[in-house]
Image: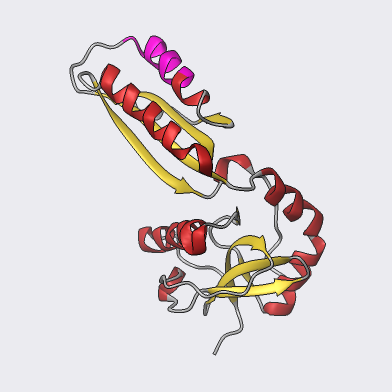
Amino acid sequence: MSENLYAYGVVENDEFELDVDGVAGAERVYTVSHGPLAAVVSDIDTMDPDLSDENARAHDDVLQTVLLDGGGRTVVPMQFGSVFKNARTLKNVLRGGRRAFTKSLREVDDLAEFGVKLVADEDATVDAAEIRAAASEHLAAASVGEEENDLFSDRLVMNHSYLVDRDERTRFDEAIDAITDDYGDVLTVQYTGPWPPYNFVDIEIGTQQ
């Protein structure tokens, strides 16, 4: 069996297995620990997994399960395709990146990312700037971080990511409801999450070692 390990993200040192399928159909998702850190991994036969819809969804599903399992964990996500030749190589990365990982885990402790898209209905006439400002005001008050993403469609009024404290989730949900009440007749609110803080951590990791 291949020693290659596909890594999803880094958590504080903890040994656990998750009841979720991994990338490339992996049936076992578990942790590899070193010092104060642990990487969430599964076994894989290749160093270059295919970025298919199925694999991308599996990557996200594992990270979302980490966030919610056991009452919730803080996780620093790795980008899709982070594959290590063996456990020793991965532990070397955990050791070398210890300071950066620990700093990021501290910065996003008990926080999760949520995506909010506001999509104008066909043929609806909207003041996009006004709606965006009002919605952002609602959501910023219930979150601790905000990132603007690309407006890749003419109908896309707003595409933001928010960093939300677990204890403020109800308040954030209520802000989403208020936006839906105010503008639901002219647009659709697409609300996703919780996700790991993809847009709020930035760690470069070398995997081909």
- Vertical comparison of 162 with 2: above or below: above
Question: Which quadrant holds the N terminus?
Answer: bottom right
The residue lying at 65 percent from left, 74 percent from top is 32
Residue 31 visible somewhere in the drawing: yes
Residue 84, position in %: x, y? 65, 72
Residue 76, position in %: x, y? 62, 53
Residue 187, position in %: x, y? 25, 23
Residue 147 within the magenta-colored segment of the rendering: no
The residue lying at 80 percent from left, 66 percent from top is 95
Identify the colour scheme used: secondary structure
Residue 111, position in %: x, y? 57, 44
Residue 155 visible somewhere in the drawing: no
Q: Main secondary structure of the magenta part?
A: helix
Image mark count: 0
Q: Is residue 203 left or right of residue 155?
A: right
Q: Which segment is the magenta one?
A: 127-137
Q: Nearer the viewer, residue 159 or 12?
A: 12
The residue lying at 49 percent from left, 34 percent from top is 161
